[in-house]
Image (cartoon, grey):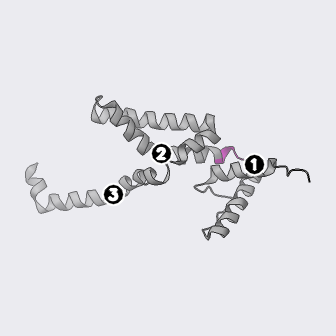
Amino acid sequence: MTEFVSSSLGQTVGLALGLALFPLMIWPLRGLVQDVWQLPMVVQLRPKTGGAIVAATILAIFLVTGWLLGTGHAEGRLLIAAAFGARPALFLIRQVVWSQTPPAVRREAADIRNELAFRLQERTVNFERGWPTFVFDVERARRRAAYEPPPI
């Protein structure tokens, strides 16, 4: 085995494998920067859906790391599970909330997101497809519909 690793063919295969797996490593690591802060807010907005999906995702990653790394160091495995579970959990929550939201509310949420996107000079969204801040925009649409201005 060491002869293959030290040969030029083995090093080429290792480099190709590393380059092929690099996007798979970046995807959850981006979750550390972009998605971990969203988890408490999404769980607060959708406690049943969000809480169940976050718990199931983190438990699944915790069990897989226990199977791969051994049962020791539970605290470290829990930290890994929480860090790498944010991105898949938010993706699943967004898909579930998308399927439960009526098209009229989706359209209103897209209008709100497009107003913000125009103001912040960001890309606009289409109400026929989900977008990263969909759960928050649905909550904005719900609160906008329930708002009553104070009497004058």
Residue 143 in percent (x, y) is at: 75, 48
Tell me: residue 11, above or below residue 49. below
Lower position in the chain sequence, tag 3 or tag 2 = 3
44 above or below 107?
above
Query: In the drawing, does residue 45 fall left or right of residue 85?
Result: right
* Amino acid type shown at disc 2: Ala
Res. 143 mark: 1
Instruction: Give the residue drawn at x 86%, y 50%.
Output: 150
Measure the C-alpha gap from mark 1 to mark 3: 41 Å
The x, y position of residue 29, in whole percent, is: 40, 52
Numbered circle sitting on residue 86: 2
Query: Does the magenta stretch mainly form a helix, a strand or a loop?
Result: helix
Label number found at residue 22: 3
Q: Position of residue 54 (x, y in %)?
A: 52, 38
- The earlier-in-sequence mark between 2 and 1 is 2
In space, the residues marked 2 and 1 are separated at their CA atoms by 26 Å
Please report the bounds of the magenta region as a residue range: 98-102
Residue visible at 75% across and 56% down in the picture: 108
